Image (spheres, rainbow, N blue to C red):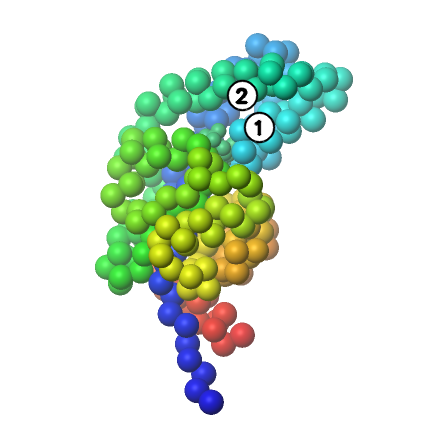
Amino acid sequence: MTNELKPMKAVIFDLDGVLVTTDGFHYRAWKELADELGLAFDEEVNHQLRGISREDSLRAIYRNNPGIQLPPDDVFHAQCTSKNARYVELLQQMTPADILPGALELLEALRAEGIKTGVASASKNAPLVLERTGLGKLIDAVADGNSVARGKPDPEVFLVAAQKLEVMPENCVGVEDAATGIEAIHRAGMPAVAIGKQAVGGDVTVNKTAELNIAIIKELWMSKQKG
Ligand code: B16
Ligand code: MG
């Protein structure tokens, strides 16, 4: 019996915290809303919001304010909309300078080797971020908060990205900076690269995107083939 090696056909990247950083913009938009509503909110709480949807983020902010009740649905959604309006306003300042160091080089190296590149982001603003930074040119397919019903850790966004890339999940590697995202990648049946130690559970971890290169991804792929 021959032991055929599966080829790696695509690498699917989370967006925020992996290819770009919008943390500061999310923080400012949430902070302004929180101040208006008299809710406590700081950088530490902001950190907990990595990779989770807008609605789950606001729920988490309320959870951190145990004395204050979650408002009725219509008010809650109006608060999400108001945060997003401010966030979108802040995103207009984004430029190619907001691409994380190493991201462009990695995407170009994958392209040069004929490996497809995808994005799997929880953000409904992913298309705007890709457009503002110019990253869209190096991405073959995008799955985001607009294309899925279930957020990470559900695997849907990674599976939709693979489908849009026209590759099987078993031929993909995922890259994430959040633990929920690592779980989503694994549940999609893909090996996971973790960016930063907060992204617990990765098959390989690097401290930042600048430390990731195609050789590390290939090595991970080979080790999974053997295992
Ligand atoms: P939006 P990712 C995530 O993007 C962010 O990390 C998270 O902080 C944000 O709440 C979420 O997108 C939803 O974003 O409000 O723009 O739809 O890391 O999955 O690329
Ligand atoms: Mg992220």
Q: What is the quadrant of the C terminus in the image? A: bottom right
Element class at badge 2: helix
Nearest to the observer: residue 149 or residue 9:
149
**Residue 216 visible to an observer of this rendering:** no
* Count of numbered circles in the view: 2
- What's the residue at 49%, 60% (across, down)? 190
**Horizontal and vertical percent for residue 211?**
40, 53
Horizontal side, residue 78 vs residue 115: left or right: right
Question: On screen, 169 above or below 98?
Answer: below
Element class at badge 1: helix
Question: On screen, 177 above or below 71?
Answer: below
Estimate how packed mark 1 is, as few (under 14), some (14 to 19) or many (20 or more) residues with alpha carbons within 10 Å: some
Mark 2 lies within 8 Å of ligand 1 (Cβ measured): yes
Question: On screen, 208 above or below 149?
Answer: below
- Say which mark, if any, is on residue 55: 1
* Residues tagged 1 and 2 counted as in contact (Cβ below 8 A): yes
**Horizontal and vertical percent for residue 207?**
48, 50
Nearest to the observer: residue 84 or residue 169:
169
**Horizontal and vertical percent for residue 118?**
37, 50
- What's the residue at 32%, 56% (across, down)? 116
Horizontal side, residue 184 vs residue 145: left or right: right
Which residue is labeled 2 in the image? Answer: 80
- What's the residue at 58%, 51% (across, down)? 183
Nearest to the observer: residue 31 or residue 83:
83
**Residue 62 visible to an observer of this rendering:** yes
Mark 2: amino acid: Cys
Estimate how packed mark 2 is, as few (under 14), some (14 to 19) or many (20 or more) residues with alpha carbons within 10 Å: some
Mark 1: amino acid: Glu
